[in-house]
Image (tube, rainbow, N blue to C red):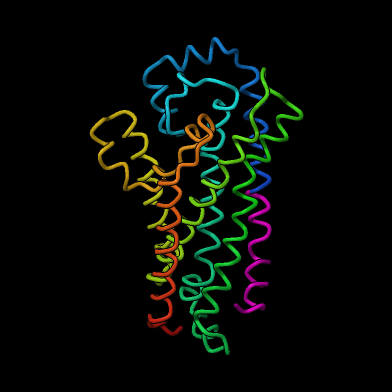
Amino acid sequence: MNRAVVLKTARDTFWLALVATVGIMLFEMLFVRAMREVPVEIANYWLGHKVFSRLIEALVGARLAENLTPTTLVTIGFAHPLVFALTWALLLTVCTRVIVGEIERGTADLLLTLPISRTRIYLSTSVVWMLAGIPVSLAPWLGMCLAQRFVPLWEPIDLQRLAMLPVNLYLLYLSIGSSATLVSSLTSRRGAAVAIVLTALLASFVLNFLSALWPAAKHVAFVGILNYYQPLPMARDGVWPIGHLAALAGFALAAWLAGLIIFRRRDIPAA
């Protein structure tokens, strides 16, 4: 790694990561506060509706109506679209800034003339977005801890069970970040790189919902990366989903290594 590149990338990333982390924590507190105002009877009533129940199932990975406790209820906050939006915005901004961003601006040839190998540049930028993902992935759980302290639900939340979820969320984060880095190594336009990754993420999100509503879609749900992030079964059973975690870790490693190999070998267009 190169210290100068790491520090420059870290400075550019710090405020984005801080906004994402604080934003997610505040959202989780507001979410728990809102859930506290909903009587259990009304929650059970809505979860009894088939379509609504299936939509929640698509988010959290299991039927919530059959496992309704304060701990399982708040897992919705770990898979809420706002959490995904803030996380994806951070990743797409950071992972495309240096590699494809420098190429698009026509300054990549200047960067690469420095006495720094492409491998060190790739490693230096990667370590920043990987480290930035730790507080972002912990943010939902930290928000729940604060909510438990200041706006508790009708029963205590099992924070020990919920502490498992950031691990799954972080591996999902690494998978998406590695994908964005790989696409950045393949393209010369930052907008195109963002569009490709975002389209794939939205397609996975839609596929998750279709698989909950349309049985035929379940046969292809495995191709979507969000299929491997299911917070409710983890919080309910307290069991690590080894298969899903291994799939995310393996995909992240493969995509990251592929991006490194391509970036080292590709021709960089001059300004």
The answer to which of 245 and 81 lies nearer the viewer is 245
Farthest-out residue, top? 41
The answer to which of 30 and 241 lies nearer the viewer is 241
Q: Is residue 139 found left or right of 189 in the rendered image?
A: right
Q: Is residue 89 found left or right of 267 in the rendered image?
A: right
Residue 64 in percent (x, y) is at 47, 23
Residue 9 in percent (x, y) is at 62, 69
Q: Is residue 271 found left or right of 167 in the rendered image?
A: left
- Residue visible at 48% across and 50% down? 172
- Residue visible at 62% across and 58% down? 132
Up-down relation of residue 105 to residue 206 (above or below): below
Q: Which residues are magenta?
A: 1-20
Up-down relation of residue 156 to residue 189 (above or below): above
Up-down relation of residue 245 to residue 258 (above or below): above
Let me know if residue 225 is in the magenta part: no
Residue 139 in percent (x, y) is at 64, 44
- Residue visible at 55% across and 79% down? 120
Farthest-out residue, left? 216
Let me know if residue 6 is in the magenta part: yes
Up-down relation of residue 270 to residue 151 (above or below): below
